[in-house]
Amino acid sequence: MSKQRQLDNLRADILAKNICPDLAAQATQLVMGDGNLNAEIVFIGEAPGKKEDEQGVPFVGASGKFLNEMLATAGLERADVYITNIVKYRPPKNRDPSKDEKQTFWPYLLRQLEIINPKVVITLGRHSMGYFLPGAVIGNIHGQPVDVTIDDDATYCLIPLYHPAAALYNGSLRQTLADDFMRVPEIIKKLA
């Protein structure tokens, strides 16, 4: 079965099981992911924002524009990578996703990763990082590759990065995020 078909089935499963019904009821649509289904890199954010909810594509608002800039600094394009979020519906008023919402969507995110099968998983922000590296502090480990094994099944090279929105709101993080992005191609070369 093709990767697209598997992702379509995963989407249908989320809808059929009415995952996070309170979130679903106030969202415009489910935002699964976007990009290259054979990508070596998967980026994982926290949840869709207003623009993402409207367009059905992750990272298309201000954070998405900044993400595109960061990809370009690393010699990458959106077409080279796959982008998703841990939570697939926009939380009301762009609030942080709750622990229960993240926990409910976690198995579906893992299934997405299993389908795409990337070499590297890059978490954007503490919400997605926290599920892969519980108790970690992003300020201490950003940009540092870590091997993580999930359910004794799949092992990924994980690179926690600050969320692009954090760099937009805190200009001092902008260069830090750019520097971290610049190291990503080198990390991938070492994995080959």
Image (cartoon, helix red, strand yellow):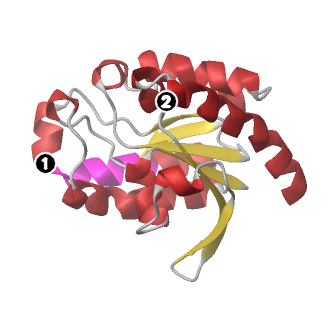
Judged from the image, the secondary structure of the residue bearing numbered disc 1 is helix
Q: Name the residue located 65 percent from the left edge and 71 percent from the top edge.
A: 155
Q: Which label belongs to residue 148? A: none
Q: Amino acid at mark 2?
A: Pro
| Disc with the residue nearer the chain's start (1 vs 2) | 1
Q: Is residue 52 above or below residue 35?
A: above
Judged from the image, the secondary structure of the residue bearing numbered disc 2 is helix
Q: Nearer the viewer, mark 1 or mark 2?
A: 2
Q: Is residue 43 above or below residue 102?
A: above
Nearest the viewer among 20 and 157 is 157
Image coordinates of residue 15 in percent, x first then y, are 26, 47
Stretch of the chain drawn in magenta: 9-20
**Is 19 positioned to the left or the right of 110 in the image?**
left
Is any atom of residue 3 visible in this view?
yes
Neighbours of disc 1 within 10 Å: few (<14), some (14-19), many (20+): few
Q: Residue furthest front?
A: 172
Is 18 contained in the magenta span? yes
Q: Quadrant of the N terminus?
A: bottom right
Image coordinates of residue 192 in percent, x first then y, are 89, 56
Which residue is denoted by mark 2 in the rendering?
164
Q: Name the residue located 53 percent from the left edge and 31 percent from the top edge.
A: 173
Q: Name the residue located 41 percent from the left edge and 63 percent from the top edge.
A: 131
Neighbours of disc 2 within 10 Å: few (<14), some (14-19), many (20+): many
Image coordinates of residue 16 in percent, x first then y, are 24, 52
Q: Name the residue located 71 percent from the left edge and 44 percent from the top edge.
A: 38
Q: Is residue 140 above or below residue 24?
A: below
Q: Amino acid at mark 1?
A: Pro
Q: Which label belongs to residue 21? A: 1
**Is 12 positioned to the left or the right of 81 in the image?**
left
